Image: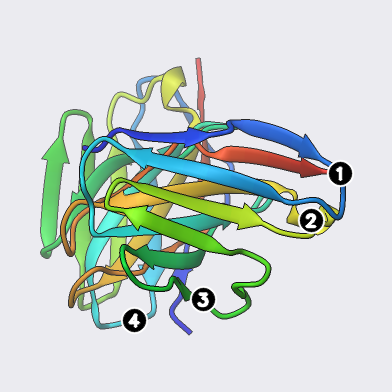
Amino acid sequence: QKEVEQNSGPLSVPEGAIASLNCTYSDRGSQSFFWYRQYSGKSPELIMSIYSNGDKEDGRFTAQLNKASQYVSLLIRDSQPSDSATYLCAVANSGGYQKVTFGTGTKLQVIP
Amino acid sequence: SAVISQKPSRDICQRGTSLTIQCQVDSQVTMMFWYRQQPGQSLTLIATANQGSEATYESGFVIDKFPISRPNLTFSTLTVSNMSPEDSSIYLCSVERSPNTEAFFGQGTRLTVV
């Protein structure tokens, strides 16, 4: 059973702070890792993708991957109330078109 | 990214009836995916649709309940058959432009069965 684990939250941070979202996965064969943001009643929106160990930065967002520890995280700097949403971690194997396994999501609340 | 148009965006249906959800992509893609997201839950893959062949269903999902069509490289439909209140969910179609890349989602269909 391939699993992706996230703390459901809610994670509450003050506006302007750094929000840290964490995800662990069970399948060591996983090669592709994604973070999606999902506002209530909306479909998931891709925030970041990461494929190799280390950090990947895009604007206020940084994804971190550690395959040895089977751990992926998302940092959101200068958090804004508009960042309040559920963040889904998604993991996929390599080898052609992949079936993506989603975590249950972490609800983030940014307090003005 | 990909532009994915999914419709209807929402519907309220009577139990025992069927609903067909359409997914149109702005360019040709090999694989399309159908997901279900039940209230308060994460996304669960229903099936993978490859043009020109039968869809591949995940454990717990069967073709009689969720028939899928994939007539060409830009379009797919998912039918939810003989609906019950337990089928009330958000249904999402998804595409990947090429292997091992990001998945993009349609707007979703919010289905309520009464």
Residue A33 picture quarter: bottom left
Residue under pointer 2: B83
- On residue B58, the disc is 3
Specify whether residue B65 is in view.
yes
Which badge, 1 or 2, comes first in the chain's sequence?
Answer: 1
Q: Provide the chain ID for the residue under circle 3.
A: B
Dot label at residue B14: 1
Amino acid type at image mark 1 = Gln
Specify whether B15 is left or right of A37: right
Nearest to the eye among marks 2 and 3: give it.
2
Residue matched to label 4 = A27
Query: Tags 2 and 3 in contact by the CB under 8 Å rule?
Result: no
Q: Identify the residue at horizontal 22%, vertical 29% (top origin).
A: A60
On-image quarter of the C terminus of chain B: top right
Q: In terms of secondary structure, where does tag 3 sit?
A: loop
Label 2 crowd (10 A; few <14 / some 14-19 / many >=20)? many
The image position of residue B7, as x and y in percent, is: 53, 34
